[in-house]
Amino acid sequence: MASESMGVEHVSEESGLVFHPMDQFIVKPLFGDGPIAWYTPTNVTLWMALAVLAIIALMVLSTRKRAIVPGRGQSIAELAYGFVYKMVEDVTGKDGIKYFPYIMTLFLFIVCANFLGLIPGSFTTTSHLAVTVVMALAVFLTVTVLGFYLHGVSFLKLFWIEQAPLVLRPILALIEVISYFVRPVSHSIRLMGNMMAGHAVMKVFAAFAGLAVIAPVSVLAISAIYALEILVSFIQAYVFAILTCVYLKDALHPQH
Amino acid sequence: MATETTAAQHVEPLALEEAGMCVDANGGAIGMPQLCFDWFPNQMFWLAVTLVVIFLVLSRVALPRIAAILAERQGTITNDIAAAEDLKAKAVEAEAAYNQALADARTEAQVIVAKAKADIQAELDVAIQKADAEIAAKSAESEKAIAEIRAGALDSVKAVATDTAAELVSVLGGSVDAKAVDAAVASRLKG
C-alpha cells in the first residue's frame, strides 16, 4: 500500500506538477496526531477560536471608547450592526428584531471565518459540510418550531396558497413542502460549496505555478481568484444571513 | 508499471475510502475531506462552542453597547439640530429686529429732516419778512430824506436865484425891489 502511494507521488513529480487541492481541508489535531474525538482540539478549534477573537476585537474592543464620533474600528462595528439590523428589520419586520442577535451571531461568524480562511495556509471552517449543515439545520429547526409555536396548525397555511385557484393549490402545496425541506440542504451546501470551490481552485492554480512557462499566468489567475474570493466571502455570509431572515419571516408571518 | 499506477490511483483511494479512511499514508486527502464523517463530531462540537461564545459576547456586551452608542449619537444629533434651529430662529428674529430698527431710524431721520427744513423755512420767512420790513422802512426814510433834500434844494435854488437876480439888478444899476424880484423868480421857477 505504501509503495503504491509512493508510485502515485512519483508520477506527479515526474510531470513537475503536484496537485493536492483538497489537502487544505484536512482536519488535524493540534497536539500530537492521535484519532480525532469530538473534544480533540484541532485546527477547526484553532480557526474558530481566531474567528471568535476577531469578533471580540471588532465588536467589543473597538467600541471600548463609546465615542460619539467613531474611530475606524468603531465605524466598522457600527456599520456591521446597522447592516444586519436593517436587513433583519426590512425582511422580517419589526417583530423580527428580537431575533437580531442570533442572525448577527451567524453573520459575524461566517464573515470572519470566511475572511480568516483567505489567509494563506489557514483552515477555512466554513468550507466544511459539518459546520454549514449544523448552522442550516439549526436555522431550519428553529424556524419550524417557532412557526408552530407562534401560529399552531395555521403555520401550515404557508404551504396552502390562497391566492391560487383551488385546483392548483394541492400541487402548489406539494411543491412548497418539497422546497421547504430542501431549504437546509441548499442553505448549507451553497456556503460550503462556494468556500470549498474557491479555495480548491486557488490551490490548483498554485500548483500550476510550478511550471516556469505558465507561472506568470498562474500568479495573475490566483490574484484574480483571490479578489473574487474576497467578494464571495462577504456575499456568502450576506446570503446566509438574509436567507435566515427570509425563513424567519415565514415563521413569523406564514400568510403570503 | 504505468497502467498499474493509474489503476492504483483509481482503485486505492476508493478502497481506502470504503475502509472509512480520510487521509492516505502520506497525509494527503482522499476524496473530499468535507465528507469524512470521522471528523463531524469534532467540528460540530467546536462549532457549537464557538457560536455560543459569540452569541454570549454579542448579546451581553457588544450589541447593547453599540445600540447605546447609536442611540446616544442620535440623541446628540437631534439635540444639535434642535439647537441649530433655535439659533436660526433667533438669527432671523435678530435680522427682523435690525431691519425694523433701520426702517425706524430712516423714518425718524426723514421726519427730522422735514422738521429741520420747515424750521429753516419758517426762520427764513421771518427773516425775509423782517428784512423786507426794514428795507421798506429804510426806503421810506430815504424817500423822505430825498424829498426833504429836494425841498431844501428847491428852497436853496429859489434863494440863490433871488439873490443872484437882486445882485444882477443892482450890478446893472437898477434899484432892487425885493417883491418884484421874488415874483419874477417864482414865475420863472414855475415855468
Image: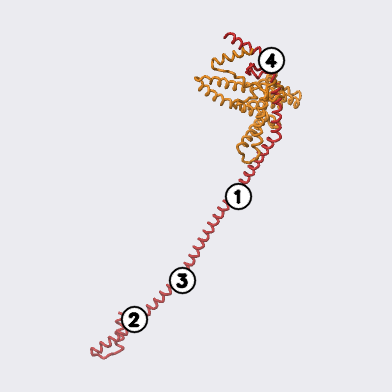
Residue B11 vertical placement versus A100 (above, below): above
Label located before the other in sequence (3 or 2): 3
Q: Toward which corner of the image does residue B58 lie, by quadrant? A: top right
Dot 4: within a 10 Å radius of its alpha carbon, few (fewer than 14), some, or many (20 or more) residues? few
Q: What residue does disc 4 label?
A: B20
| Mark earlier in primary sequence (2, 1) | 1
Residue shown at the point (27%, 90%) measured from the top left: B176
User: Which mark lies nearer to you, 4 or 1?
Assistant: 4
Q: CA distance from mark 2 to mark 4?
A: 169 Å
Q: Amino acid at mark 4?
A: Gly
Of labels 2 and 4, earlier in sequence is 4
- Disc number lying in front (4 or 3): 4
Residue at x 31%, y 80% (from the top left corner) = B190
Disc 1 on helix, strand or loop? helix
Secondary structure under tag 2 reads helix
Task: State which chain is coloured red.
Answer: B
Mark sitting on residue B153: 2
Q: Amino acid at mark 1?
A: Lys
Instruction: State the SS at label 3.
Output: helix
Q: Which residue is mark 1?
A: B90
Q: CA distance from mark 4 to mark 3?
A: 139 Å
Q: Position of residue B148 (x, y in %)?
A: 38, 80
**Same-subunit check for callouts 2 and 4:** yes
The letter of the orange chain is A
Q: Which residue is mark 3?
A: B130
Amino acid identity at mark 2: Ala
Rounded to the nearest whole Å, what is the CA distance between mark 3 and mark 2? 33 Å
Q: Is residue A153 visible?
A: yes
**Chain to which mark 4 belongs:** B
Q: Are marks 4 and 1 in contact (CB under 8 Å)?
A: no
